Image (cartoon, grey):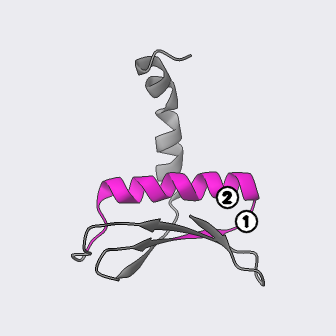
Amino acid sequence: MIFRDPVTRHLIVGEAKSRHYKGSVSPYERYQVTLYLGMAQRIYRRPATAILLFGNGRRVSVAFDQATYQHLLALLPDCRRDSGRR
């Protein structure tokens, strides 16, 4: 989900998780929202924040990490090759 604050135009990327929060965000979840944040910032050209909403009602903010985003984007050629796409 992507929300936009009507006053600041700041983007909020939301992700609902069925599991209960147990003190940390998994690497998979962090990578997932890092991709969402990077794509949202690229498309909408606005600062963005990610919020994970867990099944037990906990909300956790995840900061955007540009280095991780670039690393994940660098995997795209391998993904295309492995899926048979060019």
| Above or below: residue 78 compared with residue 74 | above
Secondary structure of the magenta portion, mostly? helix
Residue at point 68%, 68% (across, down) = 47
- Residue 32: % across, % down: 43, 53
Instruction: Pick whichever, 19 or 80, lies toward us.
Output: 19
Few, some or many residues within 10 Å of mark 1 (<14, 14–19, 20+): some
Q: Which mark is residue 41?
A: 2
Label 2 – label 1 distance at C-alpha: 5 Å
Residue at point 21%, 75% (across, down) = 22
- Residue 69: % across, % down: 51, 50
Instruction: Pick whichever, 68 or 4, lies toward us.
Output: 4
Amino acid carrying mark 1 in the image: Arg
Q: Is the C terminus in the top left, top right, bottom left or bottom right quadrant?
A: top right
| Above or below: residue 38 compared with residue 54 | above
Element type at marker 1? loop
Element type at marker 2? helix
Q: In the image, which residues are magenta?
A: 24-50
